[in-house]
Amino acid sequence: MHSLARFALAGVFLLGGCRASDQANQAQPQAAEAAIAPILATPDAIDTHSYARPLEARVTHVALDLTVDFDTRRIAGTAALDVDRKPDAKEIVLDDNGLEIESVTDAGKHPLAFKVAAKDVNLGAPLIIALQPDTRRILITYKSAPDAPALLWLTPQQTAGKKAPFLFSQGESIENRSWIPTQDSPAVRQTWEATIHVPAGVTAVMSAPRIEQPLTQGGESVFNFRMDHSVASYMIAIAVGDLAFKPLGPRTGVWAEPPTIDAAARELSDTEKMVAAAEKLYGPYRWGRYDVIVLPPSYPLGGMENPTLTFLTPTFIAGDKSLVSLVAHELAHSWSGNLATNAVWNDFWLNEGMTTYAEGRIIEELYGKKAAAEHAALSIDAMNKAVAENGGPGGADTRLHLDLKGRHPDDGTSDIAYEKGAEFLRTIEANVGRDRFDAWLKGWFDRHAFQPVTSAMFLADIRQNLIKGDKALESKLMLDRWVYRPGVPPNLVRPPANTFAEQDRATTAFALRGAAPSAWADWNTEERLRFLNRLPRKLPESRLDALESAYDLNGASNMEIRFAWLDLAVSNRYDPALASLERFLTSQGRGKFVKPLIRALAEDESWGKPIAKRIYAEARPLYHPLVTRDLDKLKL
Ligand code: BES
Ligand code: ZN
């Protein structure tokens, strides 16, 4: 862009920025603001994964003006931070992971002294900025590092459309400090706005409403976004690429690369209904629009609940909506997680367990009781597996409230948080009755909207507003045991025992006699998964041949089924699945699928390891840092 045009543009956006910031501050409900300080002061809310000391000086608003540079793989520009501080605070501490900081000034452009202290491998480093007595706003000029862990830069070749490069970010849990210098703790909430410059021809979307029409001039497009609700920093997200949009309903729509957009829109046709179902359960959807973006195949997650714009893996597209519980899950986070947010990663279950519970309820509203019961039965299987994988019923990491000090928060993202958390809530529901539980849960979201929450707050709230002194109920629920002790308490309430009776009979019969059940054709995805996952992990080769020839599992286009099959195939060293396995591992990078398969191969020294070596070498450029960080540890 010509320097004159750039100057003119900068002027326009500077004005826009000031206005936005004023409005954002007005929109911030004072009561919610005032309620946060006492929460931050409780021992359970001390975040060992952030260097910030928010009780001394806290960031309340972030205004970004950033340029996305695909050539250098950097995001560069400025972050203007509004600071709420104690009058005698001498410094403010931000989180930083590999940022190249050029300068730090106050609002009047006077330099402020700053230093980046020693770096921790998990947490990054504290960025400590000296405050003058009157400093209320800080301007940081910086660049992200080319290997920033929050960002994945794809070449055109690595996208579905192969035309334009692609960038997306993943902030949760503590990765956003690698591209935004702010207080990166889920307990610290901030409103934010962003002006994003990208090369002309690509589109930028973020986890906030777009304000103003994008402007393209001189080879550059400029997009503006503003989030007036205060959010945790991990909820700030960006994606840039060749993106098309299709509306799904009045307040829902989908973004995707052009080759994916039609299939994505078809698969997502229930989205508007899901929002309505969630609102019926948990009160108004408070974020305005609910859009989703379907990312390129290397997206490392199933989904991520970025406010107003859920990020989704393309692997949920099965052609028959059989995997859309993923959307119900990310949507449910609009209440559990995005409204009431775990203050610290030790209480991750408050985000994920509540969401997994609510996901089941949305499924029930849309697809009926049978679907929900099957979902819940699979959840119990997943919980039991997670208990076994985390040291058994006595394992410290099988508690809901974790102690992750000294570890990466992602160590706490097991199915304990998701499934034991959901089972806890199902157990409470079964004991108090659905109507009472629903009223309590809706009230919980209202009482803690836009605020951090802890396990201790959860327990206090449930005692005050649900148990209300009922001693018999208190002892029936075993609340503290569920939250603070390992294993699964004996009052676990299970879905009806006959939920998968047919599949379980078929599993036993097949393991004994070996005829692939023909009822498979009538089974839904959950039923097929139950059957495959309950088969003995070691089977005669003829049984695997029978399955493959009856169901064409090597060619399964439902990625959950394909994964369940490949998992079984690897544990049986089943060579006829290898070509399918290689295609699967080199065509998508979802961590939930690729990590267990590559790990299982690697653990099989003589047969699997050479295969893992070869496939990982080919697949690694496709995978996200979140995934390679784990897989690199296998030293393949
Ligand atoms: N919030 C999570 C994703 C996440 C968790 C990112 C921890 C980083 C750290 C998201 O809502 C989620 O749970 N995604 C699941 C899918 C869901 C249906 C269980 C996933 O990606 O597999
Ligand atoms: Zn989730």
Image: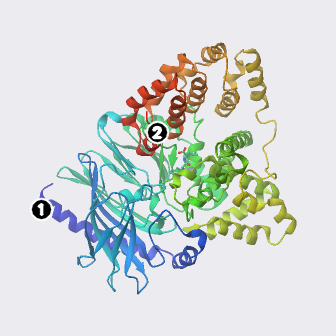
Q: Which mark is residue 631?
A: 2
Instruction: From the top left corner, tell me how far across and down residue 316 is, in percent.
Output: 53, 37
Left or right placement of residue 570 versus residue 214 in this view = right
Is the C terminus in the top left, top right, bottom left or bottom right quadrant? top left
Mark 2 close to ligand 1, CB under 8 Å: no
Q: Against 207, is 298 above or below? A: above
Q: Against 231, is 144 above or below? A: above
- The local secondary structure at tag 2 comes to helix
Residue 47 at least partly seen: yes
Q: Quadrant of residue 165?
A: top left
Please name whichever residue, 585 or 307, is drawn nearer the observer in this view of the structure.
Answer: 585
Residue corresponding to mark 1: 4
Residue 449 at least partly seen: no
First-in-chain label (1 vs 2): 1
Instruction: From the top left corner, tell me how far across and down residue 368 is, in percent.
Output: 71, 42
Left or right placement of residue 191 versus residue 449 in this view = left
Instruction: From the top left corner, tell me how far across and down residue 59 is, in percent.
Output: 41, 72
Instruction: From the top left corner, tell me how far across and down residue 309 is, in percent.
Output: 46, 52
Q: Amino acid at mark 2?
A: Leu
